[in-house]
Amino acid sequence: MKVLAFETSCDETSAAVVDGFNVLSNITHTQLEHADFGGVVPEIASRAQVRLILPITRKALKVANVELQDIEGVAVTKGPGLIGSLLVGIVFAKTISQLIKKPIVGVNHLEGHIFSAFISHKELEPPLLVLLVSGGHTELVWMQDYFDYRLLGVTLDDAAGEAFDKVAKLLGLPYPGGPQIDKIARSGRPDFVKFPRANPSGLNFSFSGLKTAVLYYLRKQTDEFIIQHKADIAASFQEAVVDSLLIKTLKAIEIHGADKLAVVGGVSLNSRLRTKFQEELSNEVSLYFPEPKYCGDNAAMIGAAGHLRIINGYVDGMDLTAYPNLQL
Ligand code: KG4
Ligand code: ZN
């Protein structure tokens, strides 16, 4: 089933054509205009979505080599995300669905991230454990079946990606900071500073204490020292995040007897996370990371989840709207 999908929940404008879990095209534009502000400005993001959605969609159809008439269903992110950005995608998707008289389905962005693992690993099937690590979320999810999720643990404060972005800012690195820390940490010593590994109750996470620990550490150092040891500090911080994620994931594997683990979301791109999870967990579980192009926000993952929803009869009407705080 050929589905035209849209993802406009934040500062990416993405359109894709998928045929089941096969991606025929996946065109994503990341707005760079937020860099000057050190974070995403919602008003700028939604205006850019309006400007970009049509050209990005045209390109997605062209690259997939399909006409609008070939599309059999429409999928769009309904939340969580920025209300203005979400509404642009939703109104656009509803218009196309009416135009071609084909069903539409709203997809939870977090479910979309989980389906990125199914795009990259066609053999993968539930039940499985999922670690979802992005700029807005850090969650351990038990996926019993398609569309059947149980939340096992969440961050009690900052998301892992948010911690990366905030610490990058403290180190004077540009936004978004996650990839920057990953890059400079490669030449740093992860044992240079022993930052705390928070261990809140159950399978929950916490990253705000770590961010504060980095802040207090930096305040005690001279500018020269920070410049000289930037890579060491970045590597030490990154190691603390990866360890915190690893400790709870291992605990979840043991408690729930998981034999498959998918790690998804923007932070799953992190090279140290990938290496350390492989080293520490590959004897415990079969480990699945999406291909890098499907880790960040993209419409292909929304299309993959959307197609399965449509063929299972989950379709929406013209009252489909945005849910900025939607949970899984
Ligand atoms: O999933 P995503 O693209 O958007 C959200 O749904 O939030 O995740 C974006 C987050 C940002 O915080 C970004 O800094 C982080 O993913 N990120 C990384 C890396 N690449 C992206 N964090 C650590 N290492 C990376 N290589
Ligand atoms: Zn995301």
Image (cartoon, rainbow, N blue to C red):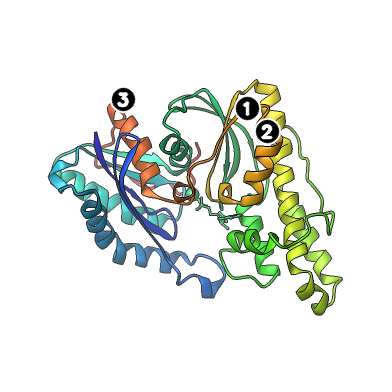
Between residues 280 and 69, which one lies in front from this camera angle?
280
Q: Which residue is mark 3?
A: 312
Callout in the foreground (1, 3): 1
Position of residue 39 relative to residue 245, above or below, is: below
* Residue at the spot 19% in from the left edge and 41% down from the top edge: 71
Callout in the foreground (2, 3): 2
Q: How many circles with numbers are drawn on the protein?
A: 3
Position of residue 184 relative to residue 3, above or below, is: below
Mark 2 beta carbon near ligand 1 (under 8 Å): no
Q: Are marks 1 and 3 in contact (CB under 8 Å)?
A: no
Position of residue 313 relative to residue 194, above or below, is: above
Determine which of the numbered discs, if any, sits on residue 281 in the image.
2
Name the residue type under label 2: Leu
User: In the visual, does 66 lie left or right of 188?
Assistant: left
User: In the visual, does 108 lie left or right of 194?
Assistant: left
Picture quarter with the N terminus: top left
Disc 1 crowd, CA 10 A, few/some/many (<14, 14-19, 20+)? some
Q: Which residue is mark 1?
A: 285
Q: CA distance from mark 2 to mark 3?
A: 34 Å
Name the residue type under label 1: Val
- Tag 1, which secondary structure? loop
Q: CA distance from mark 1 to mark 3?
A: 29 Å
User: In the visual, does 59 lie left or right of 186?
Assistant: left
Q: Are marks 2 and 3 in contact (CB under 8 Å)?
A: no
